[in-house]
Image (cartoon, rainbow, N blue to C red):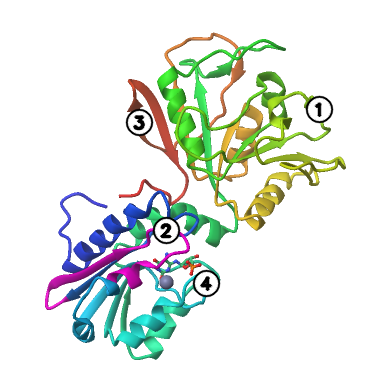
Amino acid sequence: MENNRIFTQEEIYMARCIELARKGKCEASPNPMVGAVIVCDGKIIGEGYHRICGDAHAEVNAINSIKDKSKLKQSTIYVSLEPCSHYGKTPPCADLIIEKGIPKVVIGCIDPFAKVAGRGIKKLQDAGIEVTVGVLEQECSNLNKRFITFHSKKRPYIILKWAESSDGFLDVKRTGGHPIALSTPMTNMLVHKRRAEVDAIIVGTRTALLDNPTLSVRNWYGKDPLRVVIDRTLKIPENFHLLDDKIKTWIVTEKEHINSNNTCYKKLPFTDDLLPELLAELHRNNIQSIMVEGGSVLLQSFIDKNLWDEAFIEKSAIILNDGIKAPHINGKRHFIDFHFCVPILHYYNGNNVPAL
Ligand code: AOF
Ligand code: ZN
């Protein structure tokens, strides 16, 4: 959004919808965050947001917040995402808006979910309701960039993450022993927070073999994401953490192997299409977001195939002089964030920009 911009009244109401939507940050997922505001005679008379996945949608909560329902017949409802038109866990919001006789609907962005995708708007228009679409559109879609990427690109939202030395290495060259600790204990906590915010973490074979990672969420509150490891020829020893069967894990391989309780062997073709195939499989399994944690080869493959949405790179002050070269990401840095005095370079791909 440009500086010195004058906001219209509609945009101000939509900004309030976004603000309300954010309150659903923790529990709305995998549903989108949605906020709604009802305005009558220039005053906000009702508000609501989608609190918990499976519970009432934003429009329902906004309508329910109003005592005198007769006012709805002279009101405008603002909603950050197109009202739904389908029976999911709850009935269609478009039907409710029609039933309540609300004459005007202002929408932030279209819902890319296949069962809605414009049908909500059509339903409202067919019922004679005045509909405006696209107020603070970019901001409304950024708010749900994971949900929107998942439904429109038919793949999870992809976050790349690594820490590199000040001279651009991920680690020293080694055949065993521990990785060089480039992260600080505090930035490491941040990594665990980010893990808790995604549905899956992916690592390559070399990282799995050399680091024997657990890939669990330990230094932050939250659920463990699905662990995904690329292991073409099943090289990872059975006593490694990734095969402990304690957390849901996918082993991506070209070999046949029997699954156990939490460990699922996904046989995929190891061709140039491995990553798109894997992403499609993750999509089929409702994985909305993933974080690629290494190593360098895997990260670089995601970058080279332009299969990424966001990257954050912890820039350590340590100098390694030599070692495993960090992946190369080109000219799309949006900002440098400092966490506990450590610079984190933040990149966004394409149209993805930070949400409001
Ligand atoms: C809205 N308002 O507040 C939300 C919407 O299973 P359900 O019934 O909860 O429906 C989930 C879908 O509804 C979700 O995938 C998205 O397309 C839409 N979410 N729609 O009108 C809301 N959260
Ligand atoms: Zn709805």
Type of amino acid under label 3: Ile
Type of amino acid under label 1: Lys
**Where residue 62 is drawn, which disc sits there?**
none
Q: CA distance from mark 2 to mark 1?
A: 41 Å
Q: CA distance from mark 2 to mark 4?
A: 14 Å
Residue with the mark numbered 1? 235
Query: The residue tagged with tag 1: helix, strand or loop?
Result: loop
- Cβ atoms under marks 3 and 1 closer than 8 Å: no
Q: Position of residue 322 (x, y in %)?
A: 58, 10
Q: Position of residue 60 (x, y in %)?
A: 34, 72
Q: Residues within 10 Å of mark 4 (few under 14, many from 20)?
A: few
**Where residue 336 is drawn, which disc sits there?**
3
Type of amino acid under label 2: Ile
- Furthest-right residue in this view: 256
Disc 4 versus disc 1: nearer the observer: 4
Magenta stretch contains residue 147 = no
Residue extent of the magenta highlight: 40-62
The residue at the point 26 percent across, 64 percent down is 14
Residue with the mark numbered 4? 88
> Could you tell me how many numbered marks the image carries?
4
- Cβ atoms under marks 3 and 2 closer than 8 Å: no
Quadrant of residue 208 in the image? top right
285 above or below 100? above
Q: Residues within 10 Å of mark 3 (few under 14, many from 20)?
A: some
